[in-house]
Image: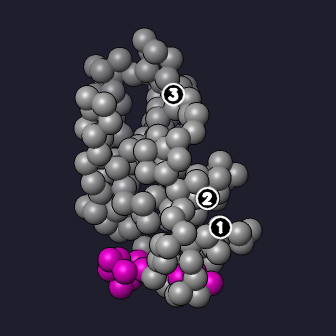
Amino acid sequence: MIIGGIAASLLGKPRLTADLDAIILLSVRQIPELMDAAGREGFEPRLQDAAGFARANRVLLLRHKKSGTDVDISLGILPFEVEAVERSQIFKAGGLYIRLPKPEDLIILKGVAHRPKDMMDMKLSQQPTLIWTGEGLKPGCRILLQSWKTPIYGMMSRQSGIRKFERPC
């Protein structure tokens, strides 16, 4: 499933991005197979110990040799990530079909990352009428905002974004 700036641009307002971010449902034990498959498709590790970094951080940092494009592959193992992939949708962009998260799942992923560019993406992808209450998530993965009836645009103005998990997902 494609996440990051590309997903934010397709689901919200377009913005410039120089890399590709994705979530793949794999365990850290499958990193060698993923690296082998990526190598066969023209990708190389960006770090000397890319496998060790991926085991520690659940992110494999690659670069497409021919284009020079950086690719960050998150290893989706948390229940929320699995659910987000299950709820994802196929989006047609030109001649490509791309699996994207639901907008509300992208907002949660961005809120958890909480970097300045993620907060900007959350603002760009917000819909003034969208109110997120955790609907559609399994009970253990409901995200609590300041208030269950807080509009997303209100949450975006808070510096701390997503407050807490009901329990770890």
Label 3 or label 2, whichever lies nearer to me, is 2
Provide the secondary structure element on which disc 3 rests.
Answer: strand
Q: Is residue 132 above or below residue 110?
A: below
- In reply to whether residue 144 is colored magenta, the answer given is yes
Q: Is residue 115 above or below residue 54?
A: below
* Boundaries of the magenta span: 134-146
Instruction: Using the numbered discs, state the Cα–Cα distance from disc 1 to disc 3 in whole angstroms.
Output: 28 Å
User: Pointer 1 and pointer 2: residues touching (CB < 8 Å)?
Assistant: yes
Residue closer to the observer: 76 or 111: 111
Instruction: Using the numbered discs, state the Cα–Cα distance from disc 3 to disc 2 in whole angstroms.
Output: 24 Å
Q: Is residue 52 above or below residue 87?
A: above
Q: Residue at x 25, y 61 (%)?
A: 86
Neighbours of disc 3 within 10 Å: few (<14), some (14-19), many (20+): some
N-terminal of the two: label 1 or label 2?
2
Task: Report the amino acid beneath label 1.
Answer: Met
Left or right of 144, for residue 91: left
